[in-house]
Image (tube, grey):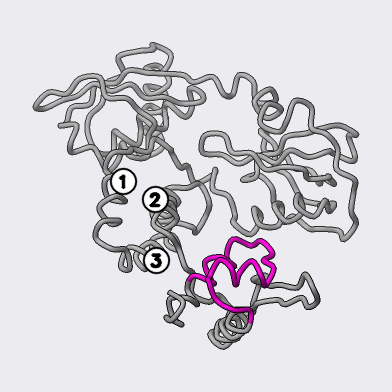
Amino acid sequence: MRNDPTGRALQLLSLLQTQRFWQAGELAARLEVTGRTVRRDVERLRELGYAVDTTTGKYGGYRLASGSHLPPLVLDDEEAVAIAVGLRYAAVAAIDGIEETSVRALSKIEALLPHRLRRRVSALHTSVTSTRRREDGDLVDPETLTVLAAACRDSEHVRFDYRRDDDGGSGRRVEPHELVTSGHRWYLVAWDRDRDDWRTFRVDRVRDPRPVATHFDPREIPGGAAAFVAAALGPALRRQDATLTIHADYADLAAVLRWIDHTPVAAGPHSCTVRIHGEDLGRLAMSVARIALCAPVDVVEPGTLASAVAQLSHNLAGRTS
């Protein structure tokens, strides 16, 4: 490695990408070279587009800084697998527009993976099934998520318009503290300045978030952000179940069931029984309607869902007759 400039530069880059500050002597010892050689290798990285900050003096050293463009990354095996798996499941995330971007990035990374790593990624993908649903109204604007995340990081006040459950709206002025994911949704935990209290906001209902260039002193979230969101949602997190008989082969329903939180119960040659799960009766009814577009379906239980589906069918028939 000492006599291989390319290999040595890659090892140096891998060390710098840990984002820690390295004293020049530490790097020289790790690479088993002189301080002068380290300086030459740092210059080589700069020529390739990597921004490396330098501090001088007795305890001087180097740190990889953010540059004007994204240079190539050096990943070890575990990091490459983690990124590939993460991109696969980002394709079903409830963030608007991220699916196509994730697929493009995944195709680039998988094309470069060695065969042994590609097999590991494939094994993980085929062994894990996602039950995450995505409804159009639940999609999160990635720009909104980015603005709120930056405001949480910088302790910066934010204004936004918020749509409530009753379809009403109101302007909010908050101190954003933390983003929390629960199921397929994102929530913002923030101190509401106008109500002088903590509030939980569904990020998909936030519109036009605007940092106001003033900062606040962070507060302590009661019980922590995750526990606060769970307590705030309360019954909304309690899952409702229903049993359906679908008159089709289970294997032929993969395209529709992938978007529905469900558990297979029994499968025959021409029909199958599944348990579907949802947050309320309305979402269960919409899941039944989605399945019915592909195959005939009967609601076994509960009776309340059967009645809701019958009412939905009646109302639709009245509108289309």
Residue 194: percent from left, percent from top: 90, 39
Q: Earlier in the sequence, mark 2 or mark 1?
A: 2
Residue mark closest to the camera, 2 vs 3: 2
Q: Amino acid at mark 3?
A: Arg
Q: Does residue 211 show up magenta in the picture?
A: no
Please say if the residues under marks 3 and 1 sit with CB atoms less than 8 Å apart: no
Q: Earlier in the sequence, mark 2 or mark 3?
A: 2
Crowding at dot 3, Cα within 10 Å, few <14 / some 14-19 / many 20+, comes out as few
Q: Earlier in the sequence, mark 3 or mark 1?
A: 3
Write the residue at 27% across / 24% down. Answer: 264
Say which residue label 1 marks.
125
Q: Amino acid at mark 2?
A: Val
Q: Amino acid at mark 1?
A: His
- Which dot marks residue 85? 2
**Alpha-carbon span between mark 2 and mark 1:** 7 Å
Residue in the foreground of this view, choosing between 62 and 206: 62
Say which residue label 3 marks.
104
Write the residue at 40% across / 16% down. Answer: 307
Crowding at dot 1, Cα within 10 Å, few <14 / some 14-19 / many 20+, comes out as some
Choose top left, top right, bottom left or bottom right for residue 39.
bottom right
Crowding at dot 2, Cα within 10 Å, few <14 / some 14-19 / many 20+, comes out as some
Residue 183: percent from left, percent from top: 52, 34
Please say if the residues under marks 2 and 1 sit with CB atoms less than 8 Å apart: yes
Residue in the foreground of this view, choosing between 54 and 71: 54
Write the residue at 71% across / 52% down. Answer: 148
**Alpha-carbon span between mark 3 and mark 1:** 17 Å
Question: The residue tagged with tag 1: helix, strand or loop?
Answer: helix
Q: Is residue 212 left or right of residue 130?
A: right
